[in-house]
Amino acid sequence: VIDRFRQYNVPIVIIDNSLANNGNFLINICNAFEIDFIILSGYLRTVPESLIEKYPNKILNIHPALLPKFGGKGMYGAKVHEAVIANNEKYSGITIHIVNQNYDAGEIIFQHKINIENTDTPDSLAEKIHKVIAINSYRESVNLAKERGCFPIWDADKEAINPFIRRVISENFDNKEYEKYLQYGRRNIANLS
């Protein structure tokens, strides 16, 4: 992922685990980069309440099952697929939801349902789920969130990224400057906390 963003000179901040629960630190980073909307991809930690309050209904995450079933604390990765198969479900899929103070309990924005075959195992189900998790699912979800007053990174109508990301890409971030920024960030990121 980092290499993909480097191709477009998008700034990256790598956050140490010790700072991941520091809401003020995360808010300072978001403010510094003028972040309007946060898209997580299977983030497994509790999002700090102060960050949720700063971005109400503007944080999305993805879950590898059809919520509200098979969600909540401890339900992630293979555990989800094992539980789905053990429960003899006919369907599974992905859920993209708004993040709130409770694991996997925010408003559901989008679900994509897939059939479970009698021959499916937790591993084969996981493979199917990973095929479903694609940019199109997130693109559609972001547009649905946009209808609820959020500001997406991707605008499917225009097939374009939002103006902030476009500005970051087009402005003065050549590779040398980017590397300088990244080195500075690694050395000084703790100063923001």
Image (cartoon, grey):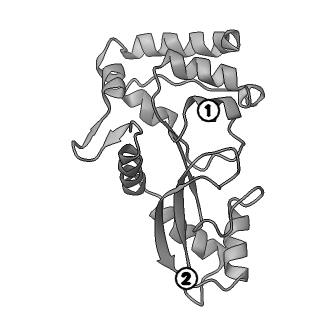
Q: Nearer the viewer, mark 2 or mark 1?
A: 1
Residue pictured at 51% horizontal, 12% vertical: 181
What residue is pinned by disc 1? 53
What residue is pinned by disc 2? 116
Indicate left or right for 16 with 59 as reference.
Answer: right
Indicate left or right for 16 with 115 as reference.
Answer: right
Q: Is residue 184 above or below residue 105?
A: above
Determine the secondary structure under disc 2.
loop
**Nearest to the observer: residue 171 or residue 88:** 88
Which quadrant holds the C terminus?
Answer: top right
Determine the secondary structure under disc 1.
helix
Residue 183, quarter of the rendered image: top right
Residue pictured at 67% horizontal, 29% vertical: 50
- Within 10 Å of disc 1 (Cα), the crowding (few <14, some 14-19, many 20+) is few
Residue 160 disc label: none
Q: Is residue 126 above or below residue 154?
A: below
Q: Amino acid at mark 2?
A: Ile
Q: Is residue 186 above or below residue 130?
A: above
> Closer to the N terminus: mark 2 or mark 1?
1
Indicate left or right for 17 with 144 as reference.
Answer: right
Residue 186 coordinates in the image, percent (x, y):
63, 16
Residue 30, quarter of the rendered image: top right
Residue pictured at 38% horizontal, 30% vertical: 7
- Within 10 Å of disc 2 (Cα), the crowding (few <14, some 14-19, many 20+) is some
Residue 185 coordinates in the image, percent (x, y):
59, 14
Residue situated furthest bottom in the rendering: 118
Q: Is residue 151 above or below residue 134?
A: above
Residue 17 coordinates in the image, percent (x, y):
74, 31
**Nearest to the observer: residue 135 or residue 158:** 158
Residue pictured at 42% horizontal, 47% vertical: 145
